[in-house]
Structure formats: structure tokens, C-alpha cells
Image (cartoon, grey):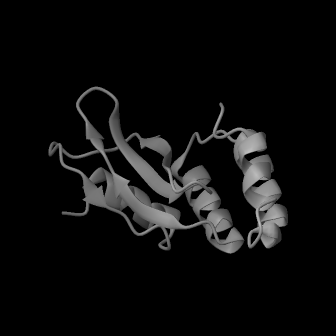
């Protein structure tokens, strides 16, 4: 997986006014560069890391796909302001095919319930 070129990050933190971003960006790059998101718990863990590193969270949502199923998705902003998605599929789901907002500060079980739509 390729998220963003490390050179682009370096060019950002070498600019005046952004030098304090070097450490957090290197940590973020290391985390995301080797990441795999297989479960909603993985997405929640990265959401929590992103928040701890000060990475701006754009929004969290469950997308509903006819064939794939529902997702637990977290959209965050990279250093250039691009919106990037981290997601995992949820096995359980209701018959409705609608996107739902998610609160990733909840427990993993509550997140799965929100994403699946089975709490209705």
C-alpha cells in the first residue's frame, strides 16, 4: 500500500513554520506505511493513533455496498489536506443499503452495531 511519498512529507516539514511536524509525520508514515486493516478493531486502533498524533479526522462512516457489505471507515487528512480512507468490512448487516455516520470513540461492539444497522 502506498499512502504518500516520504519525500512529500519531508518537503513539508522542511518548510519554515512546519519543522515541528517532522517527528509526528515520521511516526505517522511508519504506522500507515505498514498497515493492514482487516477488522473494525484495526480501524478503531488507527483512529485512536491518528487522534493521539494530531492527525485531523475528517469523518467516520459506514458505507453500504450490495456485494461487499458494510464498512467501518475513517477518513483523515494527510499533510497536504487530501482525504484518505482507512476501512474494514463488517460481516453482519441489515437489508438497508444506506451510509451511516459512525462514532469510533465507542467500543468495537458498538461500532459494529452502528455499521451493520442491526441496532434499529
User: In this orientation, which residue lies closer to the viewer: 118 or 104?
Assistant: 104
Residue in view at x 34 percent, y 29 percent: 68
List the single residue furthest toward the front: 16
Residue 6, located in which quarter of the rendered image?
top right
The image shows residue 116, relative to residue 23, as above or below, that is above
Residue at image x 48%, y 47%?
85
Q: How many marks?
A: 0
Query: Which corner quadrant of the image does residue 56 belong to?
Result: bottom right
Residue 35 lies, in percent from the top left, at 69, 42
Would you say 31 lies left or right of 58 here?
Answer: right
Q: Residue furthest left?
A: 96
Q: Position of residue 38 (x, y in %)?
A: 58, 39
Whole-percent x, y for residue 80 in the image = 58, 54
Residue at (25% x, 63% y) in the render: 119
Horizontal placement of 74 versus 29: left or right? Answer: left
Give the image quarter of residue 66. Answer: top left
Residue at screen point 32% across, 36% down = 69
- For the C terminus, the quadrant is bottom left
In the displayed structure image, the side of residue 76 where residue 9 appears, left or right: right
Vertical side of 120 occupied by 71: above or below:
above
Q: Quadrant of the N terminus?
A: top right
Amino acid at each position: 500500500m502506498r499512502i504518500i511519498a516520504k519525500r512529500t512529507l519531508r518537503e513539508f516539514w522542511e518548510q519554515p513554520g512546519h519543522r515541528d511536524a517532522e517527528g509526528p509525520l515520521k511516526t505517522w508514515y511508519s504506522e500507515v506505511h505498514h498497515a493492514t486493516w482487516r477488522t473494525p478493531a484495526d480501524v478503531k486502533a488507527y483512529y485512536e493513533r491518528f487522534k493521539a498524533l494530531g492527525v485531523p479526522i475528517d469523518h467516520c462512516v459506514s458505507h453500504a455496498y450490495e456485494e461487499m457489505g458494510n464498512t467501518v471507515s475513517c477518513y483523515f487528512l494527510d499533510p497536504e489536506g487530501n482525504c484518505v480512507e482507512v476501512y474494514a468490512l463488517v460481516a453482519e448487516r441489515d437489508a438497508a443499503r444506506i451510509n451511516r455516520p459512525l462514532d469510533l470513540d465507542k467500543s468495537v461492539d458498538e461500532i459494529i452495531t452502528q455499521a451493520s444497522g442491526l441496532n434499529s
